């Protein structure tokens, strides 16, 4: 099957089986405020169910963590206590799991324009620094571009060498953060379907998963269009079938995660057998390379450092002569 045919197959499948019930972009001219209440008197936290004066709503609660690049989607349904609970808990695990992705995609840190990934196991010999318009990579090897030459030519694909593992994190906690994002953007009309998921992300429901499927997609060169690719989406199954009732997707520049929401009553408590990757945001003719898809299992409870294989396409080699060391 060609890339074009596969793209059309995915698109036709989701168009026929799902409705898009929520979609929000990370960067809008106007801030998007998601709220369940009509007046401040009726304002309640979607996650703990409490309102004023028992809890406060002073903190800016991002419906999707700002470390993924979200600047516009704000939840008015999250109290300060829950905001801190998620930020110090599951969202911190997702942040540590995705630090390499965010650096390579050029997503800036919260209080600056740069992002950095360091190989902490080998005296930081591998270091990646990104800022708008540039990604700089320092590697322990090779020592020069000549070490990459094969039969007199540079290879088209150059693997990035060094320790590319994530910071220690619990996979199920990172998955919990994705579920929390989905619960935050879910329309009020579907609240009955996500109540058990809300209870789980807030820690009130103990469940051990043998599998927690997370769809992962990567598109090379997507950072070239900046924030225009970054958004979240929630899909609703049109009728009964083998697919999950609710699908959540979050795209942050080059990278995308996709999960089925657990515990929906419409799924009758049964893990659905039919799971597809949503079609790429980028067309099959995308000049920088096709989107690749894979499934991850984020059911693990112990902390891990996830390994990633990263390679770059060589576009141009530029020789730079460093100035001679000064002699005092």
Image: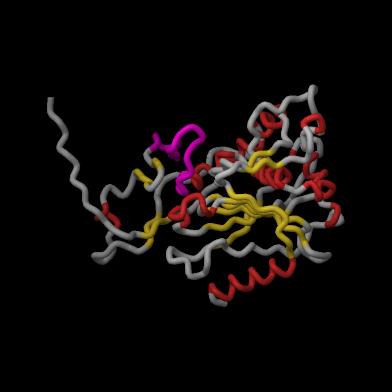
Furthest residue in direction top, as rendered: 53
Q: Quadrant of the C terminus?
A: top left
Residue 304 shows in this picture: no
Q: Mostly what secondary structure, the magenta segment? A: loop
User: In terms of depth relative to the viewer, which is nearer, 262 or 284?
Assistant: 284
Left or right, 3 with respect to 80, comes to left
* Rendering coords of residue 120 (x, y %): 45, 36
Identified at 55% across, 51% down, the residue is 230
Query: Which residue is at the far left?
Result: 327
Q: Is residue 269 magenta?
A: no
Q: On screen, 128 above or below 267?
A: above
- Does residue 145 show up? yes
Residue nearest the observer in this picture, 125 or 65: 65
The percent position of residue 174, horizontal first and vertical second, equals: 64, 43
Q: Position of residue 85 (x, y in %)?
A: 69, 30
114 in magenta: yes
Above or below residue 61? Residue 144 is below
Q: Residue at x 78, y 60 (%)?
A: 272
| The quadrant where residue 92 appears | top right
User: Which is nearer the eye, 186 or 38?
Assistant: 38
Q: Quadrant of the N terminus?
A: bottom right
- Kindly identify the residue that appears in the image at 32 percent across and 60 percent down: 315
Residue 160: x and y, percent? Answer: 40, 51
Question: Which coloring applies here?
Answer: secondary structure
Q: Is residue 57 left or right of residue 314?
A: right
- Magenta range: 103-124
């Amino acid at each position: 099957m060609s890339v074009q045919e596969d793209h059309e197959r995915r698109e036709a499948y989701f168009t026929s089986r799902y409705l898009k019930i929520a979609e929000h972009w990370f960067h809008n001219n106007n801030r998007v405020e998601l709220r369940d209440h009509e007046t401040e008197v009726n304002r309640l936290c979607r996650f703990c169910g409490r309102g004023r004066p028992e809890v406060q709503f002073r903190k800016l609660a991002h419906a999707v963590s700002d470390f993924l690049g979200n600047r516009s989607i704000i939840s008015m349904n999250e109290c300060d206590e829950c905001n801190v609970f998620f930020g110090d808990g599951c969202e911190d695990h997702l942040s540590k799991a995705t630090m390499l992705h965010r650096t390579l995609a050029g997503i800036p840190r919260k209080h600056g324009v740069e992002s950095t990934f360091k190989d902490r196991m080998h005296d930081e010999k591998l270091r990646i620094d990104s800022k708008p318009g540039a990604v700089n990579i320092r590697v322990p090897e090779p020592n020069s571009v000549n070490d990459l030459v094969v039969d007199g030519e540079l290879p088209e694909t150059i693997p990035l060498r060094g320790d590319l593992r994530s910071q220690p994190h619990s996979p199920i906690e990172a998955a919990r953060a994705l579920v929390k994002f989905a619960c935050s953007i879910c329309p009020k009309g579907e609240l009955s379907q996500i109540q058990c998921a809300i209870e789980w992300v807030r820690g009130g429901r103990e469940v051990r998963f043998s599998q927690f499927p997370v769809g992962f997609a990567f598109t090379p060169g997507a950072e070239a269009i900046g924030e225009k690719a970054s958004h979240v989406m929630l899909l609703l199954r049109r009728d009964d079938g083998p697919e999950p009732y609710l699908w959540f997707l979050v795209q942050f520049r080059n990278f995308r995660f996709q999960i089925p929401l657990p515990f929906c009553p419409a799924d009758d408590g049964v893990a659905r057998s039919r799971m597809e990757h949503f079609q790429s945001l980028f067309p099959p003719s995308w000049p920088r390379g096709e989107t690749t898809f894979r499934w991850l299992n984020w059911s693990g409870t112990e902390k891990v450092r996830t390994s990633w294989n990263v390679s770059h396409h060589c576009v141009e080699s530029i020789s730079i002569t460093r100035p001679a060391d000064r002699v005092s």
